[in-house]
Amino acid sequence: MGLLEGKRAVIFGVANERSIAWAIAKTLHKEGARCALTYATERLKERVETLAHSLNSEIVLPCDVTSDEQINSTFSAIKDKWQTMDILIHSVAFAKKEELKGKLLDTTREGFQIAMDVSVYSLIALSRQAFPLMENTGSIITLTYYGSQKVVPNYNVMGVAKAGLEAVVRYLAEDMGPRGVRINAISAGPVKTLAAMGISGFGEILKRVEERAPLRRNITQEDVAGVALFLASPLSEGVTGEVIYVDAGYNIMGL
């Protein structure tokens, strides 16, 4: 019997087979969880449905996290099908490509609002809907990055957004903790995903981490998925409000 036998997980952020969210979905499924997947746009529908089919997923839903109407519809469908849920994976972030180069000084008001809405507020909006469906216990997991704490060239407004996301994790931990619902963030090192490749100079970031991290390598999607499994499982019942680094140790280094 797997660690998550009988658990129900709703996963936001699968875009393709290289997505961190997809690695997490596969790992949770392998440990017995039933997984519902969502897709952000019609362009991703067929691809996500194919991936979901490989997990025997019974729920695949559209959900633009900038739309309260779609969020409400998504969780209404989950409630109708499952009644309850146990795990929420929030692997959602976005900033306009032009905001991910140059200087933070050049960030537009529109670009800032989009990054904060999609990357930060969405965690609040999704948690608000998931919380009533989590009976007695539950686990919410989001993805962040070290650019929230230190300056990473070209990360710009996403660094600001990830700092906000980590603050949201702490406040939501207090809001939901009395009911036994936990929320944590995984600070993943750089991984070659569709989203990451949009950051100017991303190849140089990968090279620097491989040279400097104590493990002398970059991480994989599966490294992140293993920690997500821990946070989703009963093994971490005493952990909430935390940011756990999965970056081959890079964050501990000074020079």
Image (cartoon, rainbow, N blue to C red):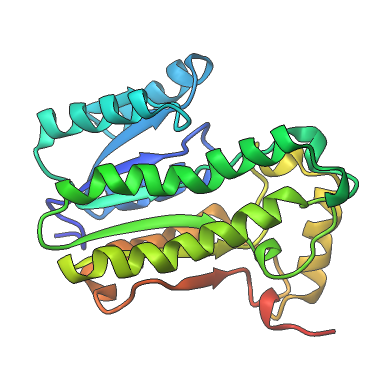
Q: Considering the image in quadrants, where does the C terminus appear?
A: bottom right
Front-lying residue, 149 or 172: 172
Front-lying residue, 15 or 68: 68
What is the quadrant of residue 214 in the picture? bottom right
- Identify which residue is drawn at 53% across, 32% down: 16
**In the image, residue 242 above or below residue 196:** below
Extreme residue toward the right, this view: 102
Residue 174: image x %, image y %? 32, 70
In the drawing, does residue 155 fall left or right of residue 30? right
Extreme residue toward the front, this view: 109
Residue 109: image x %, image y %? 73, 37
What is the quadrant of residue 25 in the picture? top left
**Does any portion of residue 11 appear in the rendered image?**
yes
- Identify which residue is drawn at 15% across, 55% down: 5
Residue 27: image x %, image y %? 36, 52
**In the image, residue 239 above or below residue 112:** below
Front-lying residue, 75 or 91: 75
- Identify which residue is drawn at 35% across, 24% down: 70
Residue 211: image x %, image y %? 82, 71
In the drawing, does residue 42 fall left or right of residue 106? left
What is the quadrant of residue 212 in the picture? bottom right
**Does any portion of residue 18 appear in the rendered image?**
no
- Identify which residue is drawn at 35% across, 43% down: 126
In the drawing, does residue 174 fall left or right of residue 234? right
Q: Considering the image in quadrants, where does the N terminus appear?
A: bottom left
